[in-house]
């Protein structure tokens, strides 16, 4: 893959083969930033997973960096006020028909368990967009207020892909690198907690961090243990 002159110049500012401490790596990502827009800082973690193993969950970072999400709650009429009071942008049963018609003016959907029989029929629409409520990510729950509050705070889902790699945004280049580093440490700690019970030694193979357009920096992930 060919890279531009600015990218190649950034590679000269550090050792691409070295694994840096978390704080130093996060500062390097800021120092290597060369484009005009505020890039997202992304973490990539390679895991040693067997065929029957997976890692998937959500967490709320201590330092937020995304725009406030528009939350849709699929719930019965007697819980609409509760959902709206908790901060939901939309709530009710009527949104099932709206979504069937192609309306997707929201960022995340929550559903109470008693609504999933109807919401499940929206799989062709919501599934393709990654918006289908799922109990594994806390978006199918009877506790509407808690779910909405966490989502409004920026609750982020993470999961390993087919190759065993977890990709997750952890900040913005404009953020203080100390805040980004704290987000990284919180995520790595949470990832370790979600390790499958029968995972083998060396569960985490490697960790790298980069801005959207910048080069990757290896992280000495043992620092977070």
Image: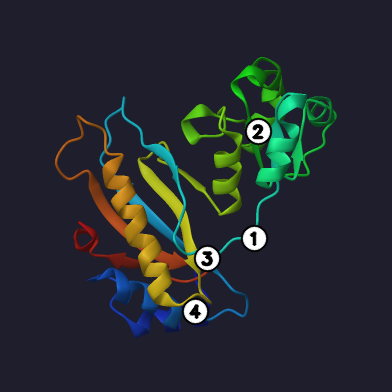
User: Is residue 1 in view from this perspective?
Assistant: no
In terms of image quadrants, where is residue 112?
top right
Asked if residue 51 can be seen in this view, the reply is: yes
Query: Marks 3/4: CA distance?
Result: 9 Å
Q: Are marks 2 and 4 in contact (CB under 8 Å)?
A: no
Where is 178 relative to 54, above or below?
below
Q: Nearer the viewer, residue 47 or 103?
A: 103
SS class of the residue under badge 3? loop
Residue 218's x, y, as percent?
30, 65
- Nearer-N-terminus badge (2/4): 4
Side of 108 relative to 213 (left or right): right
Tell me how far mark 2 sits from mark 4, CA to CA: 33 Å
Residue at 52% across, 62% down = 64
Within 10 angstroms of label 3, few (less than 14), some, or many (20 or more) residues? Answer: some
Instruction: Return the disc, 3 or 1, that comes first in the chain's sequence.
Output: 1
Q: CA distance from mark 3 to mark 1?
A: 17 Å
Residue under label 3, please give it: 212
Calculate the distance from the C-alpha at mark 2 to the C-alpha at mark 3.
24 Å
The secondary structure type at the circle numbered 4 is: loop
């Amino acid at each position: 893959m060919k890279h531009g002159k600015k990218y190649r110049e950034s590679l000269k500012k550090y050792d691409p083969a070295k694994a840096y401490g978390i704080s130093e790596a996060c500062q390097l990502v800021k120092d290597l930033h060369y484009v005009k827009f505020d890039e997202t800082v992304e973490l990539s973690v390679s895991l040693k997973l067997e065929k029957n193993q997976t890692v998937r969950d959500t967490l709320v970072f201590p330092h937020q960096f995304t725009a406030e999400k528009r939350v849709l709650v699929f719930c019965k009429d007697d819980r609409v006020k509760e959902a709206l009071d908790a901060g939901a942008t939309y709530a009710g049963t009527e949104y099932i028909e709206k979504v069937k018609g192609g309306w997707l003016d929201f960022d995340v959907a929550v559903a109470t368990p008693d609504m999933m029989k109807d919401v499940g029929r929206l799989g062709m629409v919501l599934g393709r967009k990654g918006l289908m409520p799922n109990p594994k990510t806390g978006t199918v729950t009877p506790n509407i207020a808690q779910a909405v509050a966490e989502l409004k705070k920026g609750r982020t889902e993470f999961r390993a892909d087919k190759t065993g790699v977890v990709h997750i945004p952890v900040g913005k280049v404009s953020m203080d690198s100390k805040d980004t580093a704290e987000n990284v440490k919180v995520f790595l700690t949470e990832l370790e907690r979600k390790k499958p019970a029968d995972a083998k030694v060396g569960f985490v193979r490697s960790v790298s961090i980069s801005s959207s357009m910048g080069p990757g920096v290896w992280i000495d992930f043992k620092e977070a243990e």
